[in-house]
Image: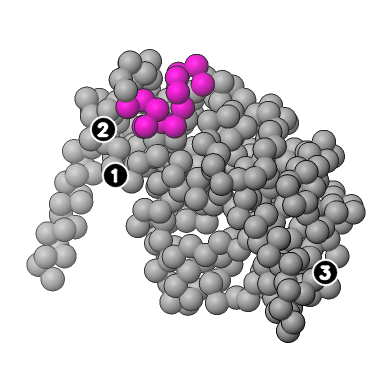
Amino acid sequence: QQQQQQQQHNRKRRREETPPLQDQVLPSLHAEELENEESFHELVGLPTTDDLAVLCHALGLPPSLQGSKTGVICEGEDALLLFLMRYRCTTPLANRAPFANKKEWNSLVIDDMFNTMLHWVDQHHGHRATWSSAVFSKKQRKRYMTAFQDTMQGCPIPKLIGFLHVACRPCNSENLGNCIKFQQVLTPDGMIGSVVGPYAGNQRDIQVLNESQLKQSMEMNCEGCTIFAHAGIVPDVPHIMAAAPEPVQPWSIEEFFNKRMFELQDSVEWPLYALFDVFPFLNSPICQHVTSHPVDLYYIIGVFLYNCLNCMGLVHRSDDSQLSVMPPTLEEYLS
């Protein structure tokens, strides 16, 4: 009891000692100073500050943003810099450049501005992660189908445009089966064209598919096209084809079909690994605490940011990929 009283006293004293932050304008982070260091690309994921300005403009960020809790005000470009750095780093930012020498940018302010940016991006662009009309445009769909058919051994499905994948992310909730699921559609241009979730880890993949409304989206936007799913996820669903049942006879048509489709699937799934290389934050312990952090939003917005960088040509393509399809431009993706 004495320990609890002491903790309450300490919290009260810290509140009294903390100056009011409402409407306080934060000093600039001077991203151009970071650019002179070799670590700029490592910290931000962008080669230069020019790329930062391009992404800021494309997203439509306002000149300044106000923290939702502290009320502090910072420049829009600084907010984006912080946002990207948070996704790039797994350690606290307060002790790293460019925050370390600026007392106004303390941990409270950094967390508040990150969450403010998270919800701003979700409000203005989150729907593009759920279903991207640019990724599934008529022009891109034609590119996908051509790329699959032009591979050395061709493709058994004439109008294939992508692969369905259910990602399981660890979490600390037994009620969710100790993981949460996200359903994703991967396309040969390295884009994650659709991500929906989270779903409880103990839900069957067929339940996830039915709840995701993917079938309806395909019917409305991709008539005549097909997405391939792994074995057993769904039988006889329009626009979504599953692997053939395990063949009884060796060297059968079904065996060749499955083998070829799984080879193509390996060529398309590299973004699943690139996502965590680009944004290690998504693998941090914070992203497993579903009760105290919006880990679903972390992941979905992380996918959106990954797609933006891929459209800018800043994501390294896997050498194992048999396919070479250009993604939409950043302007097309955000239109």
Alpha carbon separation for disc pair 2 and 3: 51 Å
For residue 121, say whether it is visible.
no
Q: CA distance from mark 2 to mark 1?
A: 9 Å
Nearest to N terminus: mark 2 or mark 1: 1
Q: Which residue does the numbered mark 1 point to in the structure image?
A: 91
Residue where numbered disc 2 is placed: 96
User: Do the residues under discs 2 and 1 have CB atoms within 8 angstroms?
Assistant: yes
Which region is colored magenta?
Answer: 39-51
Residue 6 % position (x, y):
12, 59
Q: Nearer the viewer, residue 173 or 190?
A: 190
**Label 3 neighbourhood size at 10 Å, few (<14), some (14-19), many (20+)?**
few
Query: Left of 310 or right of it: where is 135?
Result: right
Mostly what secondary structure, the magenta segment? Answer: helix
**Is residue 240 placed above or below 67 in the rendered structure?**
below
Q: Residue 89, position in %: x, y?
A: 35, 41
What amino acid does circle 2 point to?
Answer: Arg
What amino acid is labelled 3 in the image?
Answer: Val
- Which quarter of the rendering shows the N terminus? bottom left
Front-most of residues 144 and 29: 144
Model colouring: one colour
- Answer left or right for 245 relative to 46: right
Closer to us: mark 3 or mark 1? 3
Q: Which residue is mark 3?
A: 237
163 or 285: nearer the viewer: 163
**Which residue is most to the bottom?**
248
Residue under the point 30% across and 37% down: 93
Q: Secondary structure at mark 3?
A: loop
User: Which residue extends farthest right?
Assistant: 224
**Furthest residue toward left:** 2
